[in-house]
Image (spheres, rainbow, N blue to C red):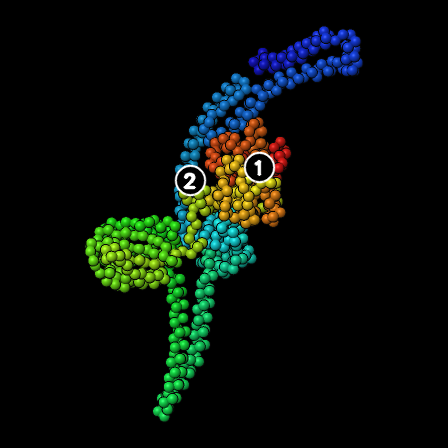
């Protein structure tokens, strides 16, 4: 007899012996305790001897169930739990070895699994290395293209044929931020993001018309098959859009390229149009007003040419000429001022952080003049609009003249706010009394090394709409102060948020070229093709009906990737006290929420951020209840489908005891950064969902509808708030 059959025989015999022993013991006890009258009473109450036997048999099931529960836990549940853990380690790099409970055979099996998993990981790492080496060149080209696009000074957006954004650069993100109605909360992320629709900003009909034009020009073989149009945004901004095709060669069976998407170069021309309109108005005023003035002046001059004009008439005519010439001069002056302002606006100025300008100036002066350059402050909070090249030339000219005239070997640079301008100061000390600056250096042609330029320092500052002067203190300390324009609020790039964990955000996903929306309903959509918004809320307590939301954090998942740079994080002023017990959990104090926007402001912005996506949360019943309670006073209704990672974990890991966030993260080998903060929990929940989707597919759960149906069958789905 084999060993397994021996264990089976022993188990059956054990159960039989337990039942027999229980019947004997129960029968002996009843016989010994009950007298004949009581025995008859019990027998009659249980329906005769047959009923007594059934009763004793039912009582025997109690120890039998305990024995069976132990056997199931030892020989069925323990191996199933081991199988789930082993399957996880095949796909996810969890360093912790398998630890099995149950029988000795199950523990031995865990050791074999650990060995096989280690060998599998070694083979996988070797294979990954070879694949990485083979695809390195392709990734390098993709990275170069993405880097090039991200650094362009134009707003660039690349879309597939469905209008879904698959690439954008930083300039486009900053421009869309200015077009957002909720920029203070979302930073424009509800408009610009991978997988979002460009039609939230641009009219679908205009884009479709431009696409038709591009297709016709491609079919006709035009060298430049582009198109352009001008459109108005909801906020009244005027945009000029240039469209160029993105083509693919197809399968090689046709010579004609196939349209795969389009590139949009977007330019905000609102200010240009206003400037042109103002220029036309001034020109029209000058033209219409000058005709009468010139006619009056000409008539007066013709009369004055007559020698018989008396003195009084001559004086009146000279007054007319003077008045008309003065009026004409004022009109010309206004036109001149407008033209100068327009010329300055067209000068290529860039938004630049003050500290970066100082760094560049220090390096340039040290290299050009071999001087010791010191810094006064760091300029971290100051943004300026400058042509950095010409400003560095102006500083080099002034510093060179200072060193040449005063023999100083040390110069200081500082940047500060001076009224509505930025003051760039070039400071030095002299050993004794000296002239104010040694000459009008700001008016002479600039010199850099042995080269003399045609522009002066004042010419450079005129281009910037600024000015320059010299100051001195007691004849020993001197300063050249250059006034430069500050960057307008919203023009300069936003300061990187503290939750951006990547040194360079990914603003592209070329795989989206291949994705087009299907005609079936969202429930029939593949989980891997959906866009998710994973979110979490922090509240003043654990009762959604009475407590208030004090923080919302969310991140998007597109094409199976967690977009860490496209996130939503906002504190909310609850308008009430935050209990100390809650502060001990999430660390959000009343001081942190004071001055923050209220829920009536934050919730519409969050709704816009998660538009056209599937909502995901861990223990989503609580978070969704919080949003539902707020519907009455905010008017915001979240009608998107919802997935719960707690329920999905119970679907995938049926034999695991724990499905809280920490336990699931540990199973996947994921660190939790910022536990019990909305953003930290949302990030780890997103990473968990990305890992759950392929495990659901292994169980035959591929669509959103299938996932929701499977989740509702778990015991946790009965949880209500």
Give the labeled residue for mark 1.
542
Binning the other alpha carbons within 10 Å of mark 1 as few (below 14), some (14 to 19) or many (20 upward) gives some
Disc 2 to disc 1, C-alpha distance = 50 Å
The answer to whether residue 492 shows anywhere in this view is yes
The reply to whether the C-beta atoms of the residues labelled 2 and 1 are less than 8 Å apart is no
Give the labeled residue for mark 2.
135
- Give how far across and how far down residue 35 sits, in percent: 76, 7
- Give how far across and how far down residue 297 sits, in percent: 40, 82
Q: Is residue 651 left or right of residue 28?
A: left
Q: Quadrant of the C terminus?
A: top right
User: Mark 1: which secondary structure?
Assistant: loop
Q: Residue at x 45, y 62 (%)?
A: 271
User: Mark number for residue 601?
Assistant: none
Chain-order first, disc 2 or disc 1: 2
Q: Residue at x 45, y 70 (%)?
A: 280
Q: How many marks?
A: 2
User: In the image, is residue 703 above or below residue 318?
Assistant: above
Q: Residue at x 43, y 29 (%)?
A: 122
Asked where in the image residue 296 lies, by quadrant, the reply is: bottom left
Q: Is residue 423 left or right of residue 515?
A: left
Binning the other alpha carbons within 10 Å of mark 2 as few (below 14), some (14 to 19) or many (20 upward) gives few
Query: In the orientation shown, which residue stands out farthest toward the bottom?
Result: 308
The answer to whether residue 513 shows anywhere in this view is no
- Give how far across and how far down residue 472 sits, in percent: 26, 58
Q: Residue at x 43, y 41 (%)?
A: 501
Depth check, front residue: 134 or 62: 62
User: In the image, is residue 694 above or below residue 408?
Assistant: above
Q: Marks 2 and 1: which is nearer the front?
A: 1
User: In the image, is residue 403 above or below residue 131?
Assistant: below
User: Mark 2: which secondary structure?
Assistant: helix
């Amino acid at each position: 007899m084999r060993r397994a059959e021996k264990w089976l025989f022993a188990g059956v015999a054990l159960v039989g012996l337990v039942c027999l022993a229980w019947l004997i013991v129960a029968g002996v006890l009843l016989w010994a305790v009950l007298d004949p009258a009581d025995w008859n009473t019990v027998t009659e109450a249980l329906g005769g001897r047959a009923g007594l036997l059934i009763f004793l048999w039912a009582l025997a099931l109690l120890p039998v169930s305990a024995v069976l529960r132990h056997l199931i836990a030892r020989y069925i549940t323990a191996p199933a739990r081991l199988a789930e853990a082993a399957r996880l380690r095949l796909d996810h790099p969890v360093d912790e070895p398998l630890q099995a409970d149950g029988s000795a055979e199950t523990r031995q099996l865990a050791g074999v699994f650990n060995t096989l998993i280690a060998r599998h990981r070694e083979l996988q790492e070797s294979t990954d290395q070879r694949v990485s080496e083979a695809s390195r060149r392709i990734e390098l080209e993709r990275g170069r293209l993405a880097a090039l696009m991200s650094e362009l000074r134009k707003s660039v957006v690349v879309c597939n044929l469905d209008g879904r954004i698959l690439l954008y650069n930083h300039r486009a993100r900053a421009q869309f931020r200015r077009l957002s109605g909720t920029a203070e909360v979302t930073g424009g992320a509800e408009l610009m993001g991978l997988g979002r629709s460009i039609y939230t900003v641009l009219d679908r009909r205009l884009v479709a018309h431009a696409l038709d034009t591009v297709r016709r020009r491609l079919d006709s073989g035009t060298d430049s098959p582009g198109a352009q149009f001008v459109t108005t945004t909801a906020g009244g901004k005027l945009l000029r859009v240039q469209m160029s095709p993105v083509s693919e060669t197809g399968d090689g069976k046709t010579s004609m390229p196939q349209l795969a998407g389009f590139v949009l170069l977007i330019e905000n021309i609102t200010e240009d149009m206003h400037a042109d309109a103002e220029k036309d108005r001034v020109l029209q005023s000058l033209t219409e007003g000058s005709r009468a003035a010139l006619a009056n002046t000409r008539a007066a001059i013709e009369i004055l040419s007559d020698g018989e004009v008396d003195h009084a008439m001559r004086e009146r005519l000279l007054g007319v000429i003077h008045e008309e010439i003065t009026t004409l001069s004022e009109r010309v002056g206004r036109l001149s001022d407008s033209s100068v302002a327009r010329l300055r606006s067209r000068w290529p100025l860039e938004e630049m952080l003050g500290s970066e300008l100082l760094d560049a100036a220090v390096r340039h002066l040290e290299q050009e003049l071999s001087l010791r350059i010191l810094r006064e402050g760091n300029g971290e909070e100051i943004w300026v609009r400058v042509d950095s090249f010409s400003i560095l030339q102006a500083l080099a000219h002034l510093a060179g003249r200072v060193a040449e005239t005063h023999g100083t070997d040390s110069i200081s640079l500082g940047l500060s706010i001076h009224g509505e301008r930025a003051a760039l100061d070039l400071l030095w000390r002299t050993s004794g009394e000296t002239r104010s600056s040694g000459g009008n250096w700001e008016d002479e042609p600039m010199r850099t090394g042995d080269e003399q330029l045609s522009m002066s320092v004042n010419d450079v500052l005129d281009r910037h709409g600024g000015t320059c002067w010299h100051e001195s203190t007691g004849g020993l300390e001197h300063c050249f102060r250059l006034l430069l324009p500050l960057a307008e609020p919203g023009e300069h790039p936003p300061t990187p948020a503290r939750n951006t964990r990547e040194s360079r955000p990914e603003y592209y996903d070329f795989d989206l070229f291949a994705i087009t929306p299907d005609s079936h309903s969202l429930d029939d959509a593949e989980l891997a093709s959906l866009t998710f918004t994973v979110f979490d809320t922090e509240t003043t307590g654990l009762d959604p009906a009475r407590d208030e939301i004090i923080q919302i954090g969310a991140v998007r998942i597109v094409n199976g990737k967690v977009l860490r740079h496209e996130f939503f994080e906002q504190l909310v002023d609850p308008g009430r006290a935050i209990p100390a017990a809650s502060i001990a959990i999430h660390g959000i104090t009343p001081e942190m929420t004071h001055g923050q926007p209220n829920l009536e402001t934050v919730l519409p912005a969050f709704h816009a951020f998660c538009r056209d996506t599937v909502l995901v949360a861990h223990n989503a019943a609580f978070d969704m209840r919080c949003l539902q309670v707020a519907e009455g006073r905010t008017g915001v209704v979240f009608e998107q489908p919802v997935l719960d990672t707690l329920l999905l974990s119970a679907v995938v890991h049926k034999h695991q005891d724990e499905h809280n966030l920490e336990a699931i993260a540990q199973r996947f080998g994921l660190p939790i950064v910022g536990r019990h903060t909305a953003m930290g929990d949302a990030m780890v929940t997103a990473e968990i969902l990305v890992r759950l989707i392929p495990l659901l597919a292994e169980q035959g759960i591929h669509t959103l509808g299938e996932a929701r149906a499977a989740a509702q069958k778990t015991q946790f789905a009965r949880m209500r708030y």
